[in-house]
Amino acid sequence: MTTQLRNIIKVAVFLALLAPFCGHSFAAAKPNVIFILTDDQGWGDAHFAGHPYVKTPNLDRLASQGTWFKQFYVAATVCSPSRAAFMTSHFPARHHIHGHFATHEQNAARFMPDWLDPKTPTITSLLKQAGYATGHFGKWHLGGGDDAPTADAYGIDDVRATVCRDPAWTEPATTFWAKSTRLFVDEAIRFIKANKERPFYANVWTLLPHAPLNPTPEQLAVYDNLVPSPDAFPNWMRDYAAQAKDLKSQMKIFCASLTDLDTQIGRLLDTLDELKLADNTIIFFSSDNGPEDYRIGNAANAGVGSPGPLRARKRSMYEGGIRTFGLVRWPGHVAAGRVDESSVLGGVDWLPTICKLTGVKMPASVQPDGEDVSDIWLGESRARRKPLYWEWLFRVQGEEYTPPMLAIRDGNWKLFVNHNGSRAELYDIPKDIAERRNVAAEHPDVVKELTAKALAWATSLPPSKARDKVAAGESLDAPRKPAKAAAKGKPALDRAAIFKAWDVNRDGKMTLEEYLAKFPDKAEGRRRYPTFDRNKDGVLSEEEFVTMGRP
């Protein structure tokens, strides 16, 4: 055997011995990705963000170990369109997703499809094609009904979801909500352990702090000594404090629910540490939109959520409805403990940014509305290259929450305008975070330029009967969900008769004491009663009781 042949054999043997380790090292080089998306959590709903009462040690931990991008925007004021934008990098109006997915009748009334088209490229389908294990755990809300595609149609291997076709959990919300985050995190942990030797991507999308909030006695006990003082409230709570009849109870329920959510996120972080995966895992944390409005009768407890100093709440394109947390943790890559006040980022940036960081080629068919902001995540300071746009066609809030129907954020400016170019509102967001001073009259050149961009963007969207209806001056408010038919042989509930029977002194008003005297579960009764009290006067009229507090 010649020396040359012996050397060739040695090299071949060395490479054969090295081969098992090469696959692992290459896989480890691709970062794992976990996307934690909460539901209706406001921009101020965390201790690190300045909330005066809530305890969120694990969100504080994420903030201390990563970067908080304080100008992060979702693409819609409510859940389904916001989620669709994260998945596709498209503004949701491109898919006629104007509001949340509901019943077929409600979707049809708003000229919406019943689900996101599964032919659309998604972040999960692209990563799956590139060898990633993909999972989704928790709320889906990208389409439901008997014929809806399941999440695997969007490139997701491992699914345990709710608010979808074939939900994994069917327990009533009154008991399920309080335990839901723990169950979702259980599934995420199972998935991570099963795929720890390969790159993985997981959506962990919670139900909380969306109503109905119904924390357990153990969860509530964390706040036994909570005594919120209206005098100490920041601006976001003063309006609520002036109307609330049982502020301590409402705030206690909200904080207890949010703290349990935080506890479950802590379990997820601890699992990554135990498996020594934390350093190679990108974690992104946000919410789908701003906090619920305390004036929504069936969501009073969730309605104490905080938009911080921002204007408005869920269902509004003012900052409080669309600006949410943008927390990113990736040890050794994303700066720890950094607060980025200036970078403007959006939910539509998620897909191109993750593709870049994972080395996954983004095909031309994606045609993203967002941009790759991985360089900003990694510490570069620059202006964004593409404006952010919004469209909201509904009128479901008070006038102080309802700007014109189009919005654009370009540089420091945010402009609102109607589809016909009327009623422009202009705000310099870095200088006026609360959008208190409309400076349109002072900057006509900026108004002209941004109005042209907003209208050009609206023209680029697919034709929409919903948009046409609004342009004609008609309302697009969705019809109410039809009442469930009475079970066979069982009469429908006569709430008017119940009111007359429970109104013991026949004064036309039902007090809490009268209500609880007939209600079998006193704790549940105390939770429900204020949700019916539409005018917040502390008693229920027959109309409020019969309509369950809905206007």
Image (cartoon, grey):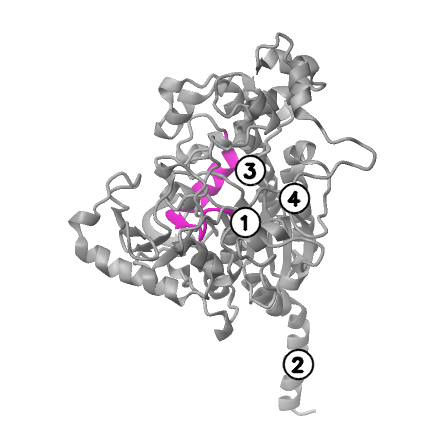
Q: Position of residue 288 (x, y in %)?
A: 50, 47
For the residue labelled by badge 3, is the local secondary structure a helix, a strand or a loop? loop
Task: Please name the residue shown 38% across and 26% down the image.
Answer: 239
Task: Using the image as rendered, state which of residue 532 and residue 9 is in the foreground.
Answer: 532
Q: Is residue 6 above or below residue 534?
A: below
User: Which residue is disc 4 drawn over?
Assistant: 184
Give the extent of the magenta segment: 55-78
Give the number of the disc on residue 12: 2
Which mark sits nearer the N-terminus, 1 or 3? 1
| Real-space CA distance between mark 3 and mark 4, rounded to the nearest whole angstrom | 15 Å
Alpha-carbon distance for marks 2 and 4? 47 Å
Label 1: which residue? 100
Q: What residue sits right under mark 3 in the picture?
A: 210
For the residues marked 1 and 2, what is the alpha-carbon distance in whole angstroms? 59 Å
Residue 67 lies in the magenta stretch: yes
Q: Quadrant of residue 199?
A: bottom right
Three-letter amino acid code of the residue under disc 1: His
For marks 1 and 3, give the one nearer the viewer. 1
Q: Earlier in the sequence, mark 2 or mark 3?
A: 2
Gap between marks 2 and 3 measured at Cα? 60 Å
Mark 1 vs mark 3, CA separation in Å: 14 Å
- Residue 82: assigned label: none
